[in-house]
């Protein structure tokens, strides 16, 4: 992640990993899981609004969905082996 990108916690990385069914994560609470699901499914206009409001979750979800090494990066962050 670049210096201008949002940072996110190990917990957020773990929640996003769980949402996408990858090892290294654990489920979020109901509200947070609904937020992750909403960001994941939103069209581009609404996703942009959600990313403005929740940049940390948005960054983690974008990493998971669109970065070739995103899942591995999230797993390293969730395990405390890398910083977001």
Image: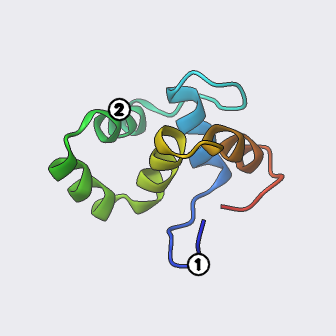
Q: Is residue 83 left or right of residue 61?
A: right
Residue drawn at x 67%, y 50% as measured from the top left: 10
**Residue 36 location in percent, x, y?**
39, 38
Residue 50 percent coordinates (x, y): 27, 53
Counting from the top left corner in percent of width and height, residue 6 is at: 50, 68
Q: Quadrant of residue 53?
A: bottom left
Q: Is residue 47 above or below residue 8?
A: above
Secondary element under disc 1, as helix, strand or loop, is: loop
Query: Residue 30 is drawn in which quadrant?
Result: top left
Residue 78's spot in the image, x, y percent? 71, 44
- Left/right of residue 5 with respect to residue 23 in the rendered view: left
Quadrant housing the C terminus: bottom right
Q: Quadrant of the N terminus?
A: bottom right
Residue carrying label 2: 37
- Name the residue rendered at 73%, 62% in the picture: 83
| Mark 2 closeness class: few <14, some 14–19, many ≥20 residues within 10 Å | some
Q: Are marks 2 and 1 in contact (CB under 8 Å)?
A: no
Residue nearer the viewer, 22 or 68: 68
Relative to 52, does residue 30 appear above or below in the rendering?
above
Circle 2 sits in a helix, a strand or a loop, which is it? helix
Looking at the image, residue 80 sits to the left or right of residue 57; the answer is right
Q: Is residue 32 above or below residue 22?
A: below
Query: Which color scheme did the rendering employ for the protein?
Result: rainbow
Report which residue position mark 1 lands on. Answer: 3
| Residue displayed at 47% across by 39% down | 65
For label 1, the crowd category at 10 Å Cα-Cα, with few meaning under 14, some 14 to 19 and many 20 or more, is: few
What's the CA distance linking mark 2 and mark 1? 26 Å
* Residue at image point 79% right, 44% down: 79
Numbered label attached to residue 36: none
């Amino acid at each position: 992640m670049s210096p201008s990108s949002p940072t996110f916690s190990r917990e957020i990385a773990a929640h996003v990993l769980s949402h996408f069914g990858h090892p290294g994560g654990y489920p979020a609470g109901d509200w947070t899981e609904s937020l992750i699901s909403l960001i994941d499914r939103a069209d581009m206009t609404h996703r942009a609004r959600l990313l403005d409001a929740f940049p940390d979750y948005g960054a983690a979800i974008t990493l998971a969905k669109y970065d070739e090494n995103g899942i591995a990066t999230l797993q390293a962050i969730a395990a405390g082996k890398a910083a977001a």
